[in-house]
Image (tube, rainbow, N blue to C red):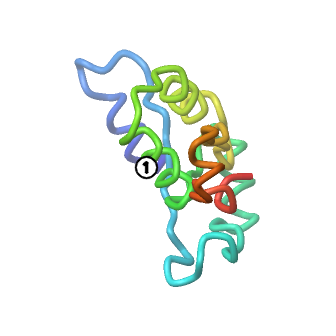
Amino acid sequence: MSTNLHEDLQREEVHQPAKGILFGNGYRLTKPGERETQFTDKCITSAASMSYGLVSTDRLYAAAQYLSGTSDDEFARRCRMAMIEMSGIVRFPDVPVTAGEAASGVQVAESILD
């Protein structure tokens, strides 16, 4: 990732380094609530020290699924800010649960998000 970011910065039209984000889906055959950490300790330490973000695809999916059915601009902004500002494991905001969803028993990725 470092090589790609450095090469990108060398381009004439690029004036500041991009944010590196690694998306991981290491346990795709395991239910989201039963998955272990997607990234090794070494990967997490390296990402934190180099200001890269680590995003588990199950967490990204929960946020994207919620946003596909709503126009919650504030939640979308908070997700973008989490990816831009966080280093190491990126923690998205909790997916809002409406009263109607809670009453109907619809589970909105609660087990996926910390």
Q: Is residue 102 above or below residue 42?
A: above
Residue drawn 58% across the image and 82% down it? 30
Residue 95 is situated, as x and y percent measured from the top left of the image, at 60, 42
Closest to the observer: 14 or 80? 80
Q: State left or right for residue 70 relative to residue 50.
A: left
Residue 113 is situated, as x and y percent measured from the top left of the image, at 67, 53
Q: Is residue 19 above or below residue 42?
A: above
- Local packing at callout 1 (Cα closer than 10 Å; few below 14, some 14-19, many 20+) is some
* The quarter of the displayed image where residue 81 is located: top right
Q: State left or right for residue 60 relative to residue 10.
A: right
Closest to the observer: 107 or 46? 107
Looking at the image, the residue that sits furthest to the bottom is 29
Q: State left or right for residue 105 relative to residue 42.
A: left
Q: How many marks?
A: 1
Closest to the observer: 102 or 97? 102
Residue drawn 70% across the image and 67% down it? 37
Residue 16 is situated, as x and y percent measured from the top left of the image, at 42, 19
Q: Which residue is mark 1?
A: 65
Label 1 SS: helix
Q: Amino acid at mark 1?
A: Gln
Q: Is residue 107 above or below residue 70?
A: below
Q: State left or right for residue 45 relative to residue 79.
A: right
Residue 90 is situated, as x and y percent measured from the top left of the image, at 64, 44
Residue drawn 68% across the image and 46% down it? 88
Closest to the observer: 34 or 105? 105
